[in-house]
Image (cartoon, grey):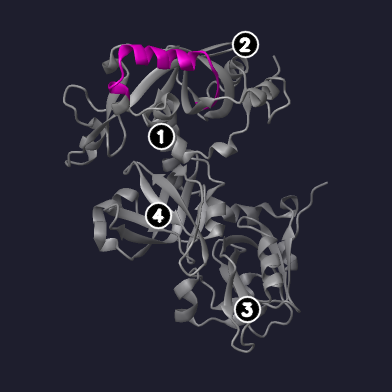
Amino acid sequence: MAYSISTQNFVALSDLHPNLARPSIIGVVIGKTDVKGFPDRKNIGSERYTFSFTIRDSPAYFINVNSWGREEYVRSLSESFRVGDCVTIENPLVQTKELEKEEKFNPTTPSCYKLLLSETHSVVKICCCYEVDTKLLSLLHLPVKDPHDYYSLGDIVANGQSLDGRIINVLAAVKSVGEPKYFTTSDKRKGQRCEVKLYDETELSFAMICWDNESIQLAQSWMPRETVIFASELRINFDKFRNCMTATVISKTIFTTNPDTPEANILFNFIKESAATGALDDITEAQLKESINLQTIVDIYTVEQLKVKALQNEGKPEPVYGIIYAYISTLNIDTDSSKIIRNRCSGCHYVVNEMSNTCTFCSDISSDAKSVFTSFDLLVDLTDHTGTLRSCYLSDVVAEETLSCTVHEFLTLTEEQKTALKWHLLLERSKIYFKLVLSPSLRTGLRVNLLSCKLADPVEASQSLSGKGRKQHCLAF
């Protein structure tokens, strides 16, 4: 039987002071930094390690916690919990914080103190979620700043370079989460980088860069087009290379995922309406592929199972991601090129108006004319031993990868070469990653976007179809 840890057994963060003997506290972890090493001035040639985190036990109170010590101790402690966990801390050292020094690199807190952890005297324990008071867990959805005190993405773009270097709060929805990129600097230090694309009612796409493992790990848990974040103390910069404004996650930044505020609820409704009406459906598969880590897609379907899954999801805006081993049974690439190649806006990737050759979306929000580029826009049928999925979307870069040629290269092919390319693909089983969304406005009732389509390994395909491969999706018929 589940039970709750009573917060009455712990000292409230608001009651902490340096003269308090052996305090025990409890709170949810709302922020955390990576472990870092520094030269130990007392022991020349050796290093001391540190990391910090922020815990909260009430709507009004949260405090920063620092740990210093041996590498083994600090790394072990850091790896024992994550942002979102509830922890208890026994016997921390309560110190008065040096305001200017403390808040230069750490989140701004309402407390006059900070906590230090000692390897020999302090103990940190993680609490099982079933044991934690729900009032504590609800704090994870409450921003640490005034929920009205934030910039929309449109505000940031409108203010432009006047915000360069400023630290502000942002409320936005997650459009995509890129794969982490790892690198080594010229002085042999290892680093990492992950780009998150945000959007809201005022701006279609805005880049936020994560440079530390903790924020990257948190970002990987966000579901694109389903998650809203309140980011406190983000740094805004003007990116000279891209010629636009971007956001950077810093050690002061705290994320509140899916905040429980009226402003966030309005943004939630915008996301749902966009998904339900297909307002964002005309985004290319290249952008979808960028926003989804294909390695996280493991569910394998047959055509029949996928149709049943779609019926089960009726009325739900959530997309279905999966893998299907199938043949492309219809591929009309040896037809009039104007029917399979479209012009798209370089700014937002929407299909442009054929008559005016201008983007109706961008013209609504900006008077600046955007250039256009050509891309494939194909409808293909997918067939396996259980049935056929008709009119699936194969577009842009994903189409180029499937056909093994760019739009410009395709336009130079003879009719005979196009027909040969078509039959080469029609005769082979492919491994296809897809996104499926219910779309009542379409004749099939389904919108299936191909995220990747490559010739399947015969052994892998055989094992998957026999149920011996990766996670196969089983449905009750």
Residue 187 coordinates in the image, percent (x, y): 48, 70
| Measured Cα–Cα span from mark 1 to mark 4 | 27 Å
Q: Amino acid at mark 4?
A: Val
Residues at circles 1 and 3 in contact by the CB criterion of under 8 Å: no
* Residue to which mark 3 is pinned: 48
* Disc number lying in front (1 or 4): 1
Residue 174 coordinates in the image, percent (x, y): 45, 44
* Disc number lying in front (3 or 4): 3
* Label 1: which secondary element: helix
Q: Is residue 416 magenta?
A: yes
**Segment tinted magenta in the rendering:** 410-435
Q: Can residue 150 be seen from the camera position used here?
A: no
Q: Which mark is residue 286?
A: 1
Choose the circle earlier in sequence order: 3 or 2: 3
Choose the circle earlier in sequence order: 1 or 3: 3
* Label 4: which secondary element: strand
Q: Residues within 10 Å of mark 1 (few under 14, many from 20)?
A: some
User: What residue is shown at x 55% (from left), y 20% (from top)?
Assistant: 314
Q: Residues within 10 Å of mark 3 (few under 14, many from 20)?
A: some
Image quarter hosting the C terminus: top right
User: What residue is shown at x 46% (from left), y 64% (from top)?
Assistant: 250
Where 93 sits versus 153, above or below? below
| Measured Cα–Cα span from mark 3 to mark 2 | 61 Å
User: What residue is shown at x 65% (from left), y 26% (from top)?
Assistant: 460
* Label 3: which secondary element: strand
Choose the circle earlier in sequence order: 1 or 4: 4
Choose the circle earlier in sequence order: 3 or 4: 3
Tell whether 297 sits left or right of 350.
Answer: right
* Residue to which mark 2 is pinned: 385
Q: Amino acid at mark 3?
A: Arg
* Residue to which mark 4 is pinned: 170
Residues at circles 1 and 2 in contact by the CB criterion of under 8 Å: no
